[in-house]
Image (cartoon, rainbow, N blue to C red):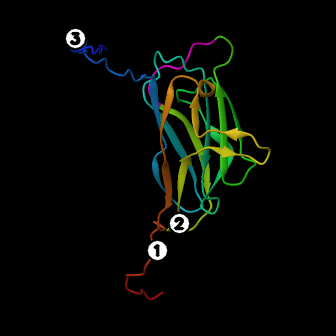
Protein backbone atom coordinates (compact mmCIF):
# COMPACT_ATOMS: atom_id res chain seq x y z
CA UNK A 1 0.00 0.00 0.00
CA UNK A 2 1.21 3.38 -0.85
CA UNK A 3 0.49 6.44 1.14
CA UNK A 4 0.03 9.94 -0.27
CA UNK A 5 1.24 12.82 1.80
CA UNK A 6 -0.89 15.89 1.29
CA UNK A 7 -0.35 18.81 3.54
CA UNK A 8 -3.29 20.99 4.33
CA UNK A 9 -2.45 24.44 5.67
CA UNK A 10 -4.14 25.17 8.92
CA UNK A 11 -4.03 28.99 8.61
CA UNK A 12 -3.36 31.53 5.91
CA UNK A 13 -0.84 34.21 6.91
CA UNK A 14 -1.92 37.75 6.22
CA UNK A 15 0.30 40.81 6.21
CA UNK A 16 -0.98 43.74 8.18
CA UNK A 17 0.73 47.01 8.86
CA UNK A 18 -0.11 49.57 11.46
CA UNK A 19 2.39 52.13 10.12
CA UNK A 20 0.90 55.07 8.28
CA UNK A 21 2.40 55.99 4.91
CA UNK A 22 5.18 58.54 5.21
CA UNK A 23 4.95 61.71 3.11
CA UNK A 24 7.50 62.25 0.36
CA UNK A 25 9.80 65.06 1.36
CA UNK A 26 10.16 67.79 -1.26
CA UNK A 27 13.15 70.01 -0.64
CA UNK A 28 12.38 73.67 -0.13
CA UNK A 29 15.11 76.08 -1.14
CA UNK A 30 15.52 79.71 -0.12
CA UNK A 31 14.63 81.99 -3.00
CA UNK A 32 14.39 85.61 -4.06
CA UNK A 33 12.35 87.02 -6.93
CA UNK A 34 13.96 89.24 -9.56
CA UNK A 35 11.76 91.27 -11.88
CA UNK A 36 12.25 93.32 -15.01
CA UNK A 37 9.51 95.98 -15.43
CA UNK A 38 7.17 96.90 -18.26
CA UNK A 39 8.42 100.28 -19.48
CA UNK A 40 7.04 102.89 -21.87
CA UNK A 41 9.79 104.93 -23.50
CA UNK A 42 10.10 107.93 -25.79
CA UNK A 43 11.93 107.66 -29.10
CA UNK A 44 15.61 108.76 -29.02
CA UNK A 45 15.71 108.85 -25.19
CA UNK A 46 17.87 107.08 -22.63
CA UNK A 47 15.94 104.97 -20.12
CA UNK A 48 16.76 103.41 -16.78
CA UNK A 49 15.26 99.94 -16.34
CA UNK A 50 15.23 98.89 -12.66
CA UNK A 51 15.63 95.21 -11.83
CA UNK A 52 13.79 94.73 -8.54
CA UNK A 53 14.42 92.01 -5.98
CA UNK A 54 12.46 90.64 -3.02
CA UNK A 55 14.01 90.62 0.46
CA UNK A 56 17.63 89.48 0.30
CA UNK A 57 18.24 89.71 4.04
CA UNK A 58 19.73 86.54 5.51
CA UNK A 59 20.08 84.77 2.16
CA UNK A 60 23.87 85.11 1.99
CA UNK A 61 23.89 86.77 -1.43
CA UNK A 62 27.42 87.92 -2.30
CA UNK A 63 27.15 87.83 -6.11
CA UNK A 64 24.76 87.62 -9.01
CA UNK A 65 25.08 87.08 -12.74
CA UNK A 66 22.51 87.96 -15.36
CA UNK A 67 21.90 87.93 -19.08
CA UNK A 68 19.12 90.01 -20.62
CA UNK A 69 18.17 89.64 -24.28
CA UNK A 70 16.38 92.37 -26.25
CA UNK A 71 15.62 93.51 -29.80
CA UNK A 72 18.50 95.77 -30.89
CA UNK A 73 16.20 97.51 -33.38
CA UNK A 74 14.30 98.90 -30.37
CA UNK A 75 16.89 99.45 -27.59
CA UNK A 76 20.66 99.25 -27.22
CA UNK A 77 22.74 99.29 -24.01
CA UNK A 78 24.06 102.75 -23.13
CA UNK A 79 27.61 103.35 -21.99
CA UNK A 80 27.77 102.58 -19.14
CA UNK A 81 25.06 99.94 -19.37
CA UNK A 82 24.14 100.03 -15.66
CA UNK A 83 23.80 102.36 -12.69
CA UNK A 84 24.04 101.00 -9.15
CA UNK A 85 23.88 104.32 -7.25
CA UNK A 86 21.13 104.18 -4.63
CA UNK A 87 20.41 100.49 -5.27
CA UNK A 88 21.00 97.35 -3.22
CA UNK A 89 24.05 96.74 -5.44
CA UNK A 90 25.66 100.06 -4.49
CA UNK A 91 29.26 99.28 -3.56
CA UNK A 92 29.39 95.99 -5.48
CA UNK A 93 31.99 95.40 -8.16
CA UNK A 94 29.96 95.32 -11.40
CA UNK A 95 31.19 94.29 -14.85
CA UNK A 96 29.11 94.37 -18.03
CA UNK A 97 29.57 92.83 -21.46
CA UNK A 98 27.63 94.33 -24.36
CA UNK A 99 29.81 93.11 -27.24
CA UNK A 100 27.27 90.57 -28.51
CA UNK A 101 24.36 92.26 -30.30
CA UNK A 102 21.00 91.80 -28.53
CA UNK A 103 22.64 90.59 -25.29
CA UNK A 104 23.53 92.41 -22.06
CA UNK A 105 25.62 90.37 -19.62
CA UNK A 106 26.26 91.67 -16.10
CA UNK A 107 28.24 90.21 -13.20
CA UNK A 108 28.21 91.73 -9.71
CA UNK A 109 30.25 90.72 -6.65
CA UNK A 110 30.50 92.01 -3.09
CA UNK A 111 34.16 93.07 -2.85
CA UNK A 112 36.47 91.65 -0.20
CA UNK A 113 34.98 90.51 3.09
CA UNK A 114 32.00 92.87 2.99
CA UNK A 115 28.66 91.54 4.23
CA UNK A 116 26.05 89.96 1.93
CA UNK A 117 23.20 91.96 0.42
CA UNK A 118 20.32 93.05 2.65
CA UNK A 119 16.88 94.47 1.94
CA UNK A 120 14.56 94.56 -1.03
CA UNK A 121 13.91 97.03 -3.84
CA UNK A 122 16.00 98.01 -6.84
CA UNK A 123 18.87 95.60 -7.31
CA UNK A 124 20.48 97.52 -10.19
CA UNK A 125 19.37 99.80 -13.02
CA UNK A 126 20.07 98.78 -16.62
CA UNK A 127 20.55 101.76 -18.95
CA UNK A 128 19.36 101.61 -22.56
CA UNK A 129 19.26 104.03 -25.49
CA UNK A 130 15.91 103.92 -27.30
CA UNK A 131 16.76 103.50 -30.99
CA UNK A 132 13.45 102.33 -32.45
CA UNK A 133 10.37 104.18 -33.61
CA UNK A 134 7.00 104.77 -31.93
CA UNK A 135 4.92 101.60 -31.71
CA UNK A 136 7.89 99.24 -31.62
CA UNK A 137 8.41 97.04 -28.57
CA UNK A 138 10.83 94.46 -27.24
CA UNK A 139 10.75 91.85 -24.54
CA UNK A 140 13.52 92.20 -21.95
CA UNK A 141 14.14 88.57 -21.08
CA UNK A 142 16.25 86.83 -18.47
CA UNK A 143 17.29 83.86 -20.58
CA UNK A 144 20.22 81.50 -20.88
CA UNK A 145 22.64 82.43 -23.67
CA UNK A 146 25.67 80.66 -25.09
CA UNK A 147 28.03 83.25 -26.57
CA UNK A 148 30.20 82.75 -29.69
CA UNK A 149 33.05 81.57 -27.41
CA UNK A 150 30.76 78.75 -26.16
CA UNK A 151 30.44 80.30 -22.68
CA UNK A 152 27.03 79.84 -21.07
CA UNK A 153 25.52 82.93 -19.43
CA UNK A 154 22.49 82.06 -17.31
CA UNK A 155 19.43 84.30 -17.31
CA UNK A 156 19.86 85.14 -13.62
CA UNK A 157 21.60 83.35 -10.77
CA UNK A 158 22.72 84.28 -7.28
CA UNK A 159 26.06 83.14 -5.85
CA UNK A 160 27.34 81.56 -9.08
CA UNK A 161 24.26 79.37 -9.43
CA UNK A 162 24.01 78.34 -5.79
CA UNK A 163 21.46 79.22 -3.14
CA UNK A 164 19.17 81.16 -3.08
CA UNK A 165 17.23 80.24 -6.19
CA UNK A 166 16.27 83.20 -8.41
CA UNK A 167 12.62 83.30 -9.47
CA UNK A 168 12.64 85.46 -12.62
CA UNK A 169 10.02 87.65 -14.29
CA UNK A 170 10.67 89.20 -17.70
CA UNK A 171 9.71 92.72 -18.73
CA UNK A 172 9.39 94.81 -21.87
CA UNK A 173 9.97 98.23 -23.42
CA UNK A 174 7.39 99.84 -25.71
CA UNK A 175 8.16 103.05 -27.57
CA UNK A 176 5.22 105.37 -27.06
CA UNK A 177 3.79 107.63 -29.73
CA UNK A 178 5.45 111.03 -29.84
CA UNK A 179 4.00 113.01 -26.97
CA UNK A 180 5.43 116.36 -28.11
CA UNK A 181 2.51 118.65 -28.86
CA UNK A 182 2.43 120.00 -32.37
CA UNK A 183 1.88 123.77 -32.33
CA UNK A 184 -1.22 124.86 -34.12
CA UNK A 185 -2.19 128.40 -34.97
CA UNK A 186 -5.52 129.41 -33.47
CA UNK A 187 -5.13 133.20 -33.22
CA UNK A 188 -6.36 136.06 -35.33
CA UNK A 189 -3.88 137.77 -37.63
CA UNK A 190 -2.78 141.18 -36.45
CA UNK A 191 -1.73 143.82 -38.93
CA UNK A 192 1.80 145.12 -38.47
Residue 168 position within the rendered picture, expressed as x and y whole percent measured from the top left: 48, 39
Calculate the distance from the C-alpha at mark 1 to the C-alpha at mark 3: 83 Å
- Whether residue 82 is in magenta: the answer is no
Task: Determine the residue located farthest toward the front in the rendered image.
Answer: 1
* Main SS, magenta residues: loop
Calculate the distance from the C-alpha at mark 3 to the C-alpha at mark 2: 66 Å
Residue 85 position within the rendered picture, expressed as x and y whole percent measured from the top left: 58, 31
Calculate the distance from the C-alpha at mark 1 to the C-alpha at mark 2: 21 Å
Residue at 62% over, 43% down: 144
Residue under pointer 2: 136
- Whether residue 118 is in magenta: the answer is yes
SS state under label 2: loop
Figure label count = 3
Give residue 191's quadrant in the image: bottom left
Residue under pointer 1: 182
Residue under pointer 3: 18
Of badges 1 and 3, the one in the foreground is 3
Of badges 3 and 2, the one in the foreground is 3
Over which residues does the magenta segment extend? 114-121
Q: Nearer the viewer, residue 76 or 67?
A: 67
Residue at 38% over, 20% down: 25
Amino acid sequence: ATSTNTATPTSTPTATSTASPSPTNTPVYPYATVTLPIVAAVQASTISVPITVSDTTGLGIVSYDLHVSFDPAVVMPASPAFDSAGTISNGMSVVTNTTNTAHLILNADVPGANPPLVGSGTLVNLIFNVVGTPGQATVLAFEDYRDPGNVLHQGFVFNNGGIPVALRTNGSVTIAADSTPTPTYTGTPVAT
